[in-house]
Image: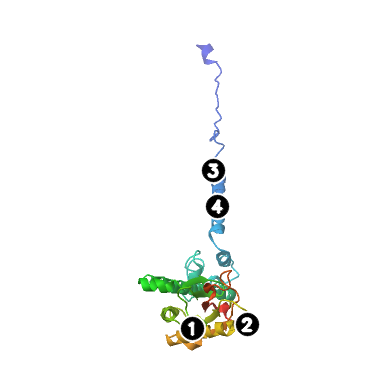
């Protein structure tokens, strides 16, 4: 009994380190910061790709504390001084601020709008002529004299002879009945637009060379006869920009004496086509 009571008492102490397997929670904070930074980076890349240069300028102005937002960035009360970062057109429409569009940009936008309206007007004229050609066999027969094309000068409506059906009494400027019918339709089509008009006359070459070649006078006289018919059909005289005769120059087909070279061009001029 006395031997047992004198035995030494041994105490074991265990050192416990909390979170030893995961090295604490600091890594979670670092990882969250990294994910947040990556999300901000991808958001920035998306904005750069999804906006125009002007819209990016507006966004930059908004976050620049030295520049009043609405004075620079747009015309609305939205987050970026406009109705949406994707709609440049709406920025100056609600009247609460200046637009990001400069004077040069506005002029360009106006020019583009005018060109679009002009292109639509040309298309409407061509559509009306196409519709007329399908009204009857007589209309189809008359419309075979017409071709149209859009060029830098404007919409060209070309009327030309066939061997079996000329537009004028041969070697004169007296219009045939088919010409009068065509001009009536063209006058109606001309009311769809407000463009100035040029009329050009061309004739086929004469089979022999003569001292007093009539082709110059004849080409002009025919062009002027078309002008008169258009005016009589309701086209205002102040819409005519120029009337010209080009004789047998610039033939449509290689055979300069072919009937196809007897032709008139009625041109609905573009603004830049007026000279």
Task: Give the x, y percent position of residue 212.
Answer: 62, 85
The residue that label 1 is drawn on is: 226
The residue that label 3 is drawn on is: 28
Task: Give the x, y percent position of residue 208.
Answer: 61, 78
Q: Are marks 2 and 1 in contact (CB under 8 Å)?
A: no
For the residue labelled by badge 3, is the local secondary structure a helix, a strand or a loop? Answer: helix
Closer to the chain start, of discs 1 and 3, is 3
Mark 1 → mark 4, Cα distance in angstroms:
66 Å
The residue that label 2 is drawn on is: 210
The residue that label 4 is drawn on is: 42
Closer to the chain start, of discs 2 and 1, is 2
Closer to the chain start, of discs 4 and 3, is 3
Q: Nearer the viewer, mark 2 or mark 1?
A: 2
For the residue labelled by badge 2, is the local secondary structure a helix, a strand or a loop? Answer: loop
Closer to the chain start, of discs 1 and 4, is 4
Q: Residue at image x 52%, y 13%?
A: 4
């Amino acid at each position: 009994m006395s031997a047992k009571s004198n035995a030494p008492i041994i105490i074991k102490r265990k050192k416990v380190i909390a979170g030893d397997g995961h090295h604490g929670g600091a890594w979670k904070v670092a990882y969250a910061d990294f994910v947040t930074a990556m999300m901000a980076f991808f958001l920035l890349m998306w904005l750069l790709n999804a906006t125009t240069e002007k819209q990016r300028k507006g966004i930059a102005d908004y976050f620049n504390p030295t520049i009043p937002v609405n004075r620079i960035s747009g015309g609305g009360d939205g987050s970026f001084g406009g109705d949406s970062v994707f709609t440049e057109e709406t920025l100056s429409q609600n009247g609460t601020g200046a637009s990001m569009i400069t004077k040069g940009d506005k002029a360009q936008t106006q020019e583009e709008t005018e060109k679009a309206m002009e292109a639509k007007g040309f298309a409407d004229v061509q559509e009306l002529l196409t519709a007329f050609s399908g009204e009857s066999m007589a209309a189809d027969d008359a419309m075979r004299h017409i071709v149209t094309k859009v060029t830098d000068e404007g919409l060209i409506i070309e009327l030309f002879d066939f061997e079996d059906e000329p537009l004028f009494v041969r070697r004169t400027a007296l219009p045939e009945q088919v010409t009068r019918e065509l001009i009536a339709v063209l006058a109606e089509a001309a009311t769809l637009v407000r463009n100035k008009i040029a009329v050009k006359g061309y004739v086929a070459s004469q089979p022999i060379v003569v001292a007093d070649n009539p082709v110059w006078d004849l080409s002009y006289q025919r062009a002027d006869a078309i002008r008169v018919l258009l005016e009589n059909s309701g086209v205002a005289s102040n819409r005519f920009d120029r009337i010209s005769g080009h004789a047998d120059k610039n033939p449509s087909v290689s055979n300069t004496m072919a009937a196809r070279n007897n032709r008139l061009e009625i041109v609905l001029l573009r603004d830049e086509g007026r000279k």
